[in-house]
Image (spheres, helix red, strand yellow):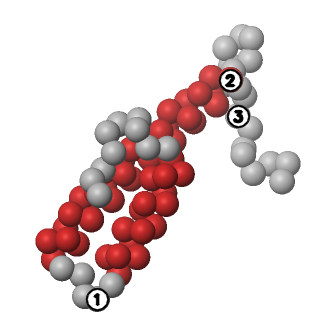
Amino acid sequence: MTAPESGKASLAEDLRRLEEIVRELEREDADLDRALALFEEGVARLRGARERLTQAEARVRKVLEDAEGQLLEIPLDEGN
């Protein structure tokens, strides 16, 4: 399986596939060429996931701006 084109896979799909890749890379009988291909796919999926998380964070920050343009910093772990 190759890395998805930008925006094609959801974050959940990427995380699921990354877990599969890690499990397969941990196998001791992994072929070197296959391991390299999996590693490359994992890096691509990780970059895509990181980009989506960065975009989501920017959207959350924008929503939290008050009417005067001041950013309301609210730690995500508060209220738990």
Amino acid type, residue under disc 2 in the picture: Val
Marks 2 & 3, CB-CB < 8 Å contact: no
In this rendering, the answer to whether 72 lies above or below 1 is above
In which quadrant of the rendered view does residue 74 lie?
top right
The earlier-in-sequence mark between 3 and 1 is: 1
**Is 53 left, or right, of 46 in this rendering?**
right
What number is the disc on residue 50? Answer: none
Q: Residue at x 49, y 60 (%)?
A: 16
Q: Gap between marks 3 and 1, in whole Å? A: 46 Å
Residue 51 is at least partly visible in this image? no
**Is 17 left, or right, of 66 in this rendering?**
left
Q: Which residue is mark 2?
A: 63
What is the count of numbered marks? 3
Amino acid type, residue under disc 1 in the picture: Glu
The residue at the far front in this view is 1
Amino acid type, residue under disc 3 in the picture: Glu
